[in-house]
Image (tube, rainbow, N blue to C red):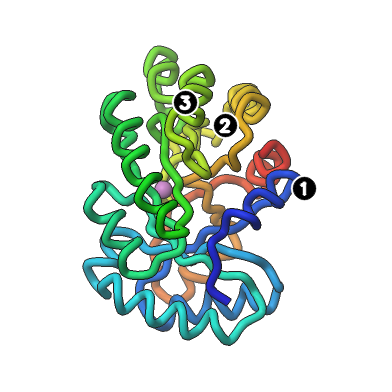
Amino acid sequence: MLVNPKAHLARARREGWALGGFNVFNLESARAVIEAGDQQAAPLLVQTSEGAVKHAGLENMVAIVRQLAGRTRAPVALHLDHGKSVELSRAAVDAGYTSVMIDASRESFDENVRDTSDIVRYAHAHGVHVEAELGTLGGIEDLGEQAVRSMLTDPDQAVRFAATTGVDALAVAVGTSHGAYKFKGTPHLDFARLQEIASRIEQPIVLHGASSLSQEEVLFAERFGARLEHARGIPAELIQKAVTMG
Ligand code: CO
């Protein structure tokens, strides 16, 4: 069934587990993710990037996911990933998404608060869940110490942001990075920072750039011609540790 993920995320936060967020872009990928969720009886977020929205269209993605989700017992949220503008996030609410992200993390703190508050008001009036992001994603090992401090999420700011905007879930930067080529060095997450943020805000915390990529999967893909030299994700142990922390 298609759901607003708020209650499931709150329960996961309380009980120390997490919902997976999986990007889809067409019928086939949506089917694969939703069928896997059904087999695991796991609540999950089926999400679309701006690229997927350009490719398939908001209304078509809503139609596909609503139809597939309606045939499963697994609670499925249709989520807009990294909505870079207030307009796109509003359009996703209007089209029937049950969750939207407004990502104004590249703007100033005040502009991020303003855009997020705007979408929170609009989405909540339509029964839709909202995620926002504070901080800039990047591998800790790839940055200097100065850059790390300015990019990773500041716990004091997170507290102010969560309270001011009333956002439902908050994506933080603690050392993960998007893509399969995340790091030059060894993946390393700032767990002390995550711990502090988690202890000071009630909202479920979202970890972006948290895909794993096992050697087994790399070898499997390479058998069919893929070239994935130097590709590496976040080791499963680090993700599991982050999950237990909120
Ligand atoms: Co992301």
Badge 3 or badge 1: first in the primary sequence: 1
Report the amino acid beneath label 3: Thr
Compare marks 2 and 3 and give the one earlier in the sequence.
3
Q: How many marks?
A: 3
Question: Which of the two residues, 163 or 32, is positioned nearer the viewer here?
Answer: 163
Q: Is residue 141 visible?
A: no
Q: Pick whichever of labels 2 and 1 is earlier in the sequence.
A: 1
Mark drawn on residue 153: 3
Q: Residue at x 36, y 38 (%)?
A: 117
Q: Nearer the viewer, mark 2 or mark 3?
A: 3
Q: Which residue is label 1 attached to?
A: 15
Q: Residues within 10 Å of mark 1 (few under 14, many from 20)?
A: few
Q: Nearer the viewer, residue 37 or 161?
A: 161
In terms of depth relative to the viewer, which is nearer, 23 or 229? Answer: 23
Helix, strand or loop under label 3: loop
Residue at 45% x, 46% y is 131
Disc 2 element: loop
Image position of 57 (left or right of 16): left
- The quarter of the image holding the N terminus is bottom right
Foreground mark, 2 or 1, reads 1
Where residue 210 sits: x, y (%)?
53, 47
From the image, tell me which residue sits under label 2: 188
- Disc 3 or disc 1, which is closer to the eye? 1
Badge 2 crowding class, 10 Å Cα cut-off, few under 14, some 14 to 19, many 20 or more, is some
Q: CA distance from mark 3 to mark 1?
A: 24 Å
| Residue type for callout 1 | Glu
Where is residue 132 drawn, in percent x and y? 42, 41
- Distance from disc 2 to disc 1, alpha carbons, whole Å, reads 25 Å
Residue 228 found in image quarter? bottom left
* As drawn, 146 above or below 172: above
Quadrant of residue 121 within the rendered picture: top left
